[in-house]
Image (tube, rainbow, N blue to C red):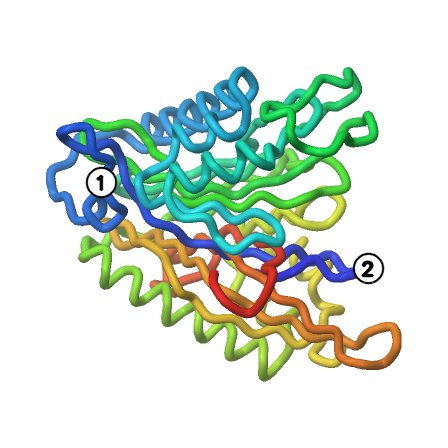
Amino acid sequence: MKPQLAGAVVLVSLVTTACAGPGAAGRTPTSSEVASDSTEKALSATEARETLRAADATMAETMSRKGSAEGIASAATGDALLLLDEHYTLRGAEAIRARLTAEPLERDGAIGAEALVWDVSADGRMGYTVGQVLLDSTGGTAGASGASPALKPGKRYQRYLAVWTRTPDGPWRLAAAVYGRARGPLSVPPSFSVTSVSAAPAMPASPSDVLAEAFAADSAFSEQSTREGMGKAFIDWAAPNAIIPGGPSGFFGREAIVRNYAPLTRDKVELRWEPRLGGGASSGDMAYTVGRAVSVSPGPDGNPDTRYVKYLSVWRRQPDGQWRYVADSGNGNPGPDGP
């Protein structure tokens, strides 16, 4: 849930957003309305994962044909959250469309996106995808808006973490997403699987109660970071199959997080955060949080270097009943407000 620090393998993460799907009478319901709807169209776990992957692929295809503004906004819920670097969190499909029309991801070129990892809650109503975006400006094609300054021709990557929700009998809709710059593509180890760990039993509960538990876990996570250091906290709170899409090619699994986060001791970086938004699955096994963070590290001149971050974290109840993060990503905030 934290920023990408110079020379360190850290990408700020944790973002939360409203969940929703298309509503009756043409209105897109909010995340709380989706989460509290008790009627459910039964989908097997395999079907739910397949339909989630298809929804992400549809968004990517629309981005490629019509640009990032239309691709992301048309997939979003009415109260969706979008975390873009150095902007406060965008709220709602129209705000997302306006910002990405003015500053498209695909400046001066073509855009392609692909989900590499995905999973769903036990009730098949909440899920997340982790993937990458390729921005190709080698052809010199103007961006969707034509308003952005020209970029030097080349290929650039971004990585994303997205949270999705769906209504009964409805499609998956984008509830929250964070996009961040990257030095290269993600590389998922062949042995990695989000379903390699036994799932916690479903414990039906109100989405608000589930979110309250996730908020408590997220706050305890931050408290450990301030006491014992960021690296120790990120290791202790990681699920066995946790993903942090930072570093050269991403960190997949707790062992990779241990190797790369152990050096991030408290004397190197002080990181604290607070959850502000989020959502929970009615099956009681998945939630997400979005919040703001402050990172303080020694600057090159010896003075403290303070950075503001916003994050999106996805949480999963483990077989022992404990909440652990399964995906975490974030990017820079322009100041201490927000997310």
Q: What percent of the width, then of the height, locates residue 130?
A: 54, 39
Whether residue 247 sits left or right of residue 47 in the image: it is: right
Q: Is residue 275 above or below residue 102?
A: below
Classify mark 2: residues with Cα within 10 Å, few (<14), some (14-19) or many (20+): few
Q: What percent of the width, then of the height, locates residue 111?
A: 63, 24
Circle 1 sits on which residue?
29
Whether residue 287 sits left or right of residue 123 in the image: it is: right
Classify mark 1: residues with Cα within 10 Å, few (<14), some (14-19) or many (20+): some
Q: What percent of the width, then of the height, locates residue 161?
A: 52, 43
Query: What whole-number distance in Å separates the C-alpha atoms at marks 2 and 1?
Result: 43 Å
Report the label total.
2
Q: Which residue type does callout 1 highlight?
A: Pro
Residue farthest along the bottom direction in this orientation: 227
Whether residue 133 sits left or right of residue 78 in the image: it is: right
Residue under the point 42% across and 54% down: 16
| Image quadrant assignment for residue 102 | top right
Residue under the point 76% across and 79% down: 304
